[in-house]
Image: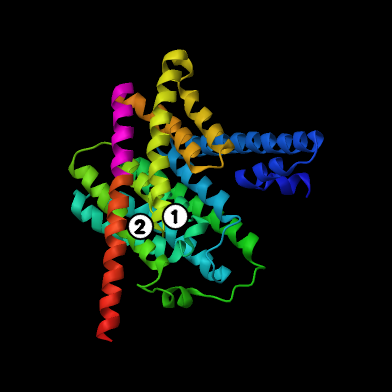
């Protein structure tokens, strides 16, 4: 494996190489490559979002984050169908992420929930066909981020331009990297594989219904940063309940640990470098291969931003309440939903 090829590995792949190193020299080499990868990624991400903010306005820096997520994921990941059709779908996903979060924000919580359900239905049914590729961590996360950081007026006009540019760039990179791959399935096959008895379809429906309900409840309770609860729910929902139990537990423990570490840093560090706590969190996420540790370091970035608006006490309270509510509600909802679908499937079979 070349230096460049090793740079393309994810955290788990890099750590696996470190674990399998037979000599000290080999281990130091793999460690060097791993650290270089983290450094290059951080510099690239920071530069990309900064340029995006300069060009399209600081209110649209989140657009840079969403476009960056899509670029980094879809340069390697695919949608499992013909490349041309996948490229068209990616364009549609960008249109949905641009229009629907803004539209939902203009409505009261319940009509907004219906818009979110319809939007997520398209994103998840056509973009998240394989739950273990975790495309939902890109598409649904991107949707929720744009929903949580909505803008109006001139800023929204600039958002339209920024998202159009992001769509073109992502589709170009995606098509270039996947055009020579041969796929036996197409869009029609995706539609034909929708099956209420399959664990995949049940998982998709849980994501589609549960995440917007969580957002709606949070908003009806007048909780700021409702997107945090939605992101927590999205992250916890998996096809199998045992996997969900692990996620729920790690998400709650990780957020508590992240809050404690953030508070410690907040009081230990001078106020002039508070903004860099979020960057520290990003580095931590880059070094983390396990979900629990990622939950810890993701808390840094979220709190670094929220503290400016709500103060330390308010931001910490919101973070804990929203995350615990999101994952617990998602777990209970999915347990009931999966059981209901199982019972309904049994009833249909008896009728047949």
Residue 116 in view here: no
Q: Residues within 10 Å of mark 2 (few under 14, many from 20)?
A: many
The answer to whether residue 156 is magenta is no
Left or right, residue 31 beside residue 111: right
Left or right, residue 9 beside residue 151: right
Left or right, residue 182 beside residue 221: right
Q: Is tag 2's residue or tag 1's residue first in the polypeptide sequence?
A: 1
Left or right, residue 105 beside residue 154: left
Magenta stretch: give its range: 311-326
Q: Rounded to the nearest whole Å, what is the CA distance between mark 2 and mark 1?
A: 9 Å
Expressed as whole percent of the image width and height from the top left, the position of residue 41 reads: 61, 38
Q: Secondary structure at mark 2?
A: helix
Expressed as whole percent of the image width and height from the top left, the position of residue 48 reads: 56, 39
Residue placed most toward the observer, 14 or 182: 14
Residue 77 in view here: yes
Q: State the residue at coordinates (64%, 66%).
A: 179
Count up the numbered dots. Answer: 2
Q: Which mark is residue 136?
A: 1
Quadrant of the frame with the C terminus: bottom left
Tell me the quarter of the picture where residue 231 sits. Answer: top left
Q: Which mark is residue 99?
A: none
The answer to whether residue 325 is magenta is yes
Is 217 drawn above or below residue 274 in the view shown? below
Q: Secondary structure at mark 1?
A: helix
Residue placed most toward the observer, 159 or 200: 200
User: Pointer 2: what residue?
Assistant: 207
Proximity of marks 2 and 1: CB atoms separated by less than 8 Å: yes
Expressed as whole percent of the image width and height from the top left, the position of residue 56 reads: 46, 40
Is 16 drawn above or below residue 203 in the view shown? above
């Amino acid at each position: 494996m070349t230096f460049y090829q090793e740079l393309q590995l994810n955290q788990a792949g890099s750590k696996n190489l470190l674990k399998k190193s037979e000599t000290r020299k080999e281990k130091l080499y793999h460690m060097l490559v791993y650290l270089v990868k983290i450094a290059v990624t951080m510099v690239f991400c920071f530069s990309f979002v900064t340029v995006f903010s300069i060009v399209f306005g600081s209110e649209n820096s989140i657009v840079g984050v969403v476009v960056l997520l899509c670029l980094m994921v879809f340069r390697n990941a695919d949608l499992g169908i013909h490349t041309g059709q996948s490229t068209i779908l990616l364009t549609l996903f960008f249109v949905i992420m641009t229009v629907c979060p803004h539209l939902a924000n203009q409505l009261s919580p319940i009509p907004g929930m219906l818009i979110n359900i319809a939007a997520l239905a398209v994103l998840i049914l056509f973009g998240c066909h394989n739950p273990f590729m975790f495309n939902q961590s890109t598409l649904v996360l991107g949707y929720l981020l744009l929903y949580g950081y909505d803008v109006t007026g001139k800023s929204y006009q600039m958002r339209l331009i920024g998202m159009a540019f992001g769509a073109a760039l992502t589709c170009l990179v995606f098509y270039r990297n996947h055009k020579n791959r041969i796929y036996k399935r197409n869009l029609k096959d995706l539609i034909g594989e929708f099956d209420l008895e399959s664990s995949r379809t049940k998982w998709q429906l849980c994501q589609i219904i549960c995440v917007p309900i969580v957002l709606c409840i949070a908003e009806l309770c007048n909780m700021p940063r409702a997107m945090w609860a939605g992101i927590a729910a999205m992250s916890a929902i998996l096809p199998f309940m045992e996997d969900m139990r692990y996620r729920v537990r790690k998400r709650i423990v990780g957020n508590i640990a992240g809050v404690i570490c953030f508070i410690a840093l907040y009081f230990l560090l001078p106020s002039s470098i508070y903004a860099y706590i979020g960057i520290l969190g990003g580095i931590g996420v880059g070094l983390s291969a396990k979900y629990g540790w990622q939950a810890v370091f993701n808390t840094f970035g979220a709190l670094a931003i929220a503290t400016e608006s709500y103060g330390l006490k308010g931001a910490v309270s919101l973070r804990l309440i929203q995350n615990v509510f999101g994952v617990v509600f998602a777990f209970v909802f999915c347990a009931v939903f999966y059981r209901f679908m199982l019972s309904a499937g049994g009833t249909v079979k008896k009728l047949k």
